[in-house]
Image: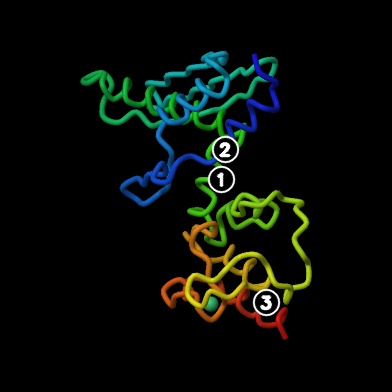
Amino acid sequence: MEHYLDIIQKLKEEFPIGTVQFTGSKRPYIPNQVYTDRLESATESKWNKVIKELDINVTHRYVKAIVTITIGEHSRDGYGVAIIKGDPEQDPSGVINAVDLAMNSAFIEALDSFQMGWRDLAPHKTSEKEWGSNPALSHLLSTEPPNGSTPTNPRALTSHICLVCSKPLIQADWELLNHVPNLRRDKMIYCFNDIPAHHKRKIPEFEISNYLLRIK
Ligand SMILES: [Zn+2]
């Protein structure tokens, strides 16, 4: 088996474009099969899933599941809860569906603690209340290492070239792109003046004022 840290690195790698899907209510998610496939290839099939707890509560109509994923010597628990729909005594399929749902969410929650899919989901979770907008996790939105040697001078020129004017972005421009929801900063590179209006509108106002202060 490969070194644990190498495996974790592989688990955290970005998935191909188009992997993130959206539920009916527009919540971003990565299908279970994609996670399983990544686990298989990164660990060379040397991972394990154990159902630690499965509580089917017919009286109160819910199912609770705790799943443990083990890679090498490291284990992570994930839990999931689902409501049993309909009357279980008339139609047991409600129970089966709830068990499936609870198990799936427990599985994904356990994988989440290995940071799988974070890079892919972060750009879709940048509204103020969501974790993707947390400054401590902003490195997930960038293709650079978290403690990279990027210049701190906001007016310093970067190696990133604007798609529109072909001029290099200054550091503040480059950092501002992090605050454009749903923008792939590795491909869609714009200087401040050339950020398309429909994208610019979505930048939180305080980020714009912060930007303008920095480049003064
Ligand atoms: Zn430009």
Question: On the image, numbered disc 3 is attached to which residue?
Answer: 210
Spatial separation of the CA atoms under disc 1 and disc 2: 7 Å
* Place of residue 49 in the rendered image (x, y in percent of width and height, measured from the top left): 53, 16
Q: Determine which of the numbered discs, if any, sits on residue 183 in the image.
A: none
The residue under label 2 is 13
Please state the total of marks drawn on the protein image.
Answer: 3
| Viewer-side residue, 77 vs 40 | 40
Rendered-image quadrant of the C terminus: bottom right
Residue found 28% across the figure and 25% down from its top: 94
Give the residue type at disc 3: Asn
Residue at 70% across, 20% down: 3
Left or right: 91, with 1 as reference point: left
Q: Nearer the viewer, mark 1 or mark 2?
A: 2
Looking at the rendered structure, the kind of residue marked 2 is Glu
Of circles 2 and 3, the one toward us is 2
Check disc 1 and report its element: helix, strand or loop.
helix
Q: Earlier in the sequence, mark 2 or mark 3?
A: 2
Q: Nearer the viewer, residue 64 or 10?
A: 10
Depth check: give the residue in front, 46 or 150: 150
Badge 3, how many Cα within 10 Å: few under 14, some, many 20+? few
Residue 203 image offset from top left, x and y in percent: 53, 71
Mark sitting earlier along the chain (1/2):
2
| Mark before the other along the chain sequence, 1 or 3 | 1
Figure check: 157 above or below 75: below
Other-residue count near label 2 (Cα within 10 Å), few / some / many at <14 / 14–19 / ≥20 = some
Where on the picture, by quarter, is residue 126?
bottom right
Amino acid type at circle 1 is Arg
Q: Which residue is mark 1?
A: 119
- In whole angstroms, how far apart are the C-alphas of marks 1 and 3? 25 Å
CB of mark 1 within 8 Å of CB of mark 2? Answer: yes
Q: Residue at x 72, y 79 (%)?
A: 214
Q: In the depicted view, which residue is nearer to us: 103 or 122?
A: 122
